[in-house]
Image: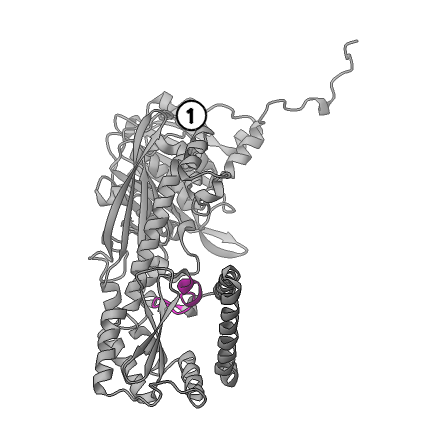
Amino acid sequence: MPDTKPATQADLFDGRVIPSNLAVTAMRDSGYKNTAYAIAELIDNAQQAGADKIEVLCLQKKETIRERAVSRLTRIAVLDNGAGMDTNTLRKALQFGNGSRLQDRTGIGRFGMGLPNASISQASRVEVWTWQNGPDNAIYTFLSVPEMESGTMDMVPVPVHKPLPKEWRTLSQSIGNSGTIVVWSDLDFNRLTWKKGKSTLENTGRLAGRIYRKFLAAKTITIRLFCADEDEGILLNKNADLDDPMYLTPSSIAPKPFDSEPMFEFLWEDTEEIEYGGSSYEVSVRYSVAGSRTIELAEGKNRGDMPYGRHAAGNVGVSVLRAGRELMLDTGWCIGYDTRERWWGCEVEFPPHLDEVFGVTNNKQHAVHFAELASIDWQQLAEEGEAFQDVVDRLKEEGDPRGWLLTLSNSLRRNLSQIRDQIKEQGAKTRSSRKSRHGGVTDTATEIANSGWKDREEEVRTEDTNDVPNDSDLTELENDLQTENNYSAEDAAELVKLIKDRNLKVIFVEARFQDPYSLFDVQRKAGGITEVIFNQRHPAFDSIFGTINTVDEDMDNLSSTDLLERLTKAINASKIIFAAWARYEREANVERAKALEKVRFDWGKLSAHFLEPDSDEL
């Protein structure tokens, strides 16, 4: 029998798959990193509309908060001199997931979410004036979050004729015959990253300078930043300047002298062809590295502590560009604890046709598939018996985007490893920084090693025990340090002076061997001097020595967590080295294994003698 009971209030639920009030609330939390990123969405729209002049305008006034007058933002606007919109285009632009460029793969737009999503993530009301025949002929419409949440606004209001208000005409410097202004009001202070106009614009300027650096460098757009207070007048009025994480284009925001000259040197560009969807697309990867001027200007000090070093620390990562517009500065490709990561630059640029491959999010802040490969190599994706190309082919067949990106990620890893080696070489040539830190005296390890060495000579004498280096021996050693170990003339002279003044018998040296497998070498030098040479190319070098002893260290700026991470890494690497020795013993035949066991015992006994007297000093 049919149910004839009268409907109760509880029965009258909203049966839509996504109730409007819940949808609006969810979209307000759509994941913009901060207010500057939300503003960047509006700049995208302006650039895509052909604007060459874009203005970000912030207005604020004093409000009484807890009996205290505080200046607070009241409105944020983005105005441009682009093509403007007609009635249908304007209504589409304010629809979520709609727009006029959904199938357009030629520019930085496409997703149809930017204007409404970005706007309601920061404000409860967004108003748009747009014109194609002068601002007097502008059309106007709006969105209101309270009305959408209550269900009284479920359609974009039909645009009406409404001239651009005089206020915005007065503040603007680029009103054209066509253009658009988007105004955010009823700002949500729980959502705004910065509560005042000047700080909002300063942070937006820094971000925009990096995101749109290609357009700013080519002078195809300018971005004006303007803030005025109702009582205090104009607080900021300037153009955003580019910020190049590759440091190949000088910028006024970079510390001197790199505001007028490049800080880095261009290395090379790789081009990767990706076949996708029946077409071939080009991905460009460019690399740069810090120039020698960064070392010279530090004058023996830690270049990381210089103003330009601190600036570079804010631009660490692989810059991912889509149609010339940066999506993200991906730090996943960096060695987190290593401050030398600031001294290289890399940018990966791809066309919008590869959005699905790279995993571009609709807020244009991430390329998730590309970022994932920073922590996964092809072996982790391989099934039993698969070679690299097998993995690539299988992933493509399965429709896994990583299949199209594996060759690119492998190349990126190899090249970054090569560039890191180059940066280590820079460090090897600038050991004068260690001189300034240690005041021209030997370090603890050298002191203890020489003490143990000399004590051992009382028990076991070598053929050169009584040798003392003469001037000729020291000159030869000084030359060897420069030619074989890449020491600077100053550092080589300092080390030779220490050998002479402190009667050193054993010294620790770093060098790049031809092979990456020798962990260290032992060389006799004239005058009874022994060099223990650590191979910078061996993985253990960075894992153990490189965690602390680098030319670009700024230890005072490291957190306790960073220091603990480095210490843990060094300890783990040491354990792994001994595990490799254990495996070496196990692979030997019985007779050789016994000989190796004796070597291990004798070496352990000797190291115990070296360490015991001074173990508290380590």
Can you say whether 358 is above or below 569 in the image? Answer: above
Rendering quarter of residue 514: bottom left
| Position of residue 147 measured from the top left corner of the image (x, y, whole percent) | 53, 30
The residue positioned 37% from the left and 82% from the top of the image is 442
The residue carrying mark 1 is 98
Q: Say which quadrant the N terminus sits in.
A: top right
Percent x, y for residue 12?
68, 22
Q: Residue at x 49, y 69 (%)?
A: 596
Residue 612 drawn in magenta:
no
Q: Quadrant of residue 254?
A: bottom left
Density class for disc 1 (Cα within 10 Å; few <14, some 14-19, many ≥20) is some
- In depth, the one of 249 and 61 nearer the eye is 249
Where is residue 489 shown, x and y percent of the image? 22, 75
Work out whether residue 287 or residue 512 is closer to the camera in this orientation and state it: 512
Label the magenta part by its dominant secondary structure.
Answer: loop
Image check: 578 left or right of 138? right
Nearer to the camera, 284 or 528: 528
Question: Magenta part of the protein: which range?
Answer: 540-554
Q: Residue at x 26, y 74 (%)?
A: 481
> Which amino acid lies under the numbered mark 1 shown in the image of this protein?
Asn
Q: Is residue 155 visible?
A: yes
**Quadrant of the image occupied by residue 33:** top left
